[in-house]
Image (tube, grey):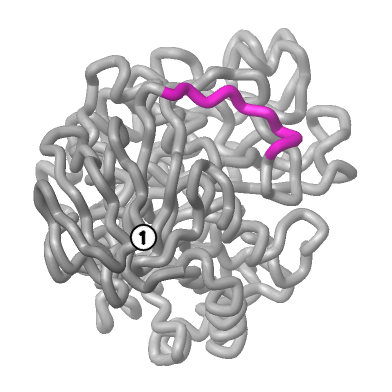
Amino acid sequence: MSDTILVKGASLYGATTADLLLRDGVLAEVGPGLSDAGARVVDADGLVALPGLVDLHTHLREPGREDAETILTGSQAAAVGGFTAVLAMANTSPVTDTAEAAERVLDLGRAAGLVDVHPVGAVTRGLGGEELAELGLMHRSRARVTVFSDDGRCVADPRVMRRALEYVKAFGGVVSQHSQDPSLAGPTSCCHEGELSGRLGLPGWPGVAEEVIVARDVMLARHTGSRVHVAHASTAGTVEVLRWAKAQGIDVTAEVTPHHLLLTTDLLAGYDPTFKVNPPLRPQEDVDALRAALADGTIDAVATDHAPHARHDKEHAFVDAAFGMLGLETALPVVASVMVDSGLMTWTDVARVMSSTPAAIAGLEGQGRPLEVGQPANFVLVDPAAPLTVDRDASVSLSRNNPWHGRTLGASVVATFLRGVPTVLDGALV
């Protein structure tokens, strides 16, 4: 394969049509009518070119649960979904709470070579919520960890959260919080608290259990002058708190998942554990508020919370099943359906919430860059006229807990390029 690739006729951000000449891992030329006799040509007529997607919230399960996903298979799913960088959550076994553990994740990601895999460090040792993990050592390691999270568990003790915020401030880190007050929504809470949870007899997970932690944490961020990131925002109340906090100049960012932008708690009526996720699916009024907040910038980013599970962990009675859904391969098509096709956002907006802003939050200098000469050739080609009909059995993930099975979504990822090398062409891994 030639080291030089010429992508012909792409629509940059869904607007200007241009050719992209890729050489030595960068965009060597961008403009109309480009030519290079030695280049391999990729026809991008009718395709939208966006910077490579960046996922702030991915569960790759390795080490410890390689029956559900590995860093290799998760990287494959990410590439197929148009991602060129993912942040791997720390709730593995062993937990990513040391420099050595973080470097191991980094090295496995580099060995896979399909996307940049950046480890997220645990906030507390063993996710126990009591003693801070090796935050400084993880940041100073080869992994250069900048984002820290006990995701799956809330850092519920305000003193511990304050100490974590103070600690990461010294090197520009950020704490990504799983906002779930354990006294209001315990470990068995699995359905949005309301009429449906009562009728189904499922333990309720009230929206206020998220909102009180978000409110507390933005005040702690203001007090410490540090950065806090709200993982998987799911309620209209959280949106209200975020709007207030940003108006006060507090350094807070937030993400929303594709499933919270489209799916509602009504899907739980059939007790299908595929739809069991934490935080739970919410009513339509929350979904509407999240869409509006993403469109107006109150919510900064889309993050998948890709959470693969082996069948024997998911196929249980609803209360006993594992939390989580797949998301990497379908995130962009869902956002296209919900936000672009509806007119709420443009493709330029999609690039902001799925690439440049997530990269900035995580401090990834080589990702989320504009499609301009001299920038790393990390980008994705999307066909907005080719809806994707999801088949869970066609997934490259090891797991099958796919909430989108059988649905037709608004666009398809055609190609993904990582530093000028195609990882996906014609919708398939290279």
List the single residue furthest toward the front.
Answer: 37
Q: Quadrant of residue 404?
A: top right
Pick the front one: 149 or 381: 381
Is 307 on the left or on the right of 374, as rendered? right
Residue at left offset 61%, top offset 9% = 195
Residue at left offset 52%, top offset 42% = 427
Is 112 on the left or on the right of 35, as rendered? right
Pick the front one: 118 or 77: 77
Q: Quadrant of residue 211?
A: top left
Above/below status of 412 relative to 23: above
x and y, in percent, of residue 187 in the image: 70, 44
Above/below status of 149 relative to 407: below
Label 1: which secondary element: strand
x and y, in percent, of residue 331 in the image: 47, 38
Q: Amino acid at mark 1?
A: Arg
Residue 244 painted magenta: no
> What residue is disc 1 on?
40
Q: Quadrant of the C terminus?
A: bottom right
Is 397 on the left or on the right of 15, as rendered? right
Residue 391 painted magenta: yes
Mark 1, Cα crowd under 10 Å, few <14 / some 14-19 / many 20+, is some
Pick the front one: 183 or 98: 98
- Find the magenta span and give its range: 386-394
x and y, in percent, of residue 154 in the image: 54, 54
Residue at left offset 32%, top offset 54% = 379
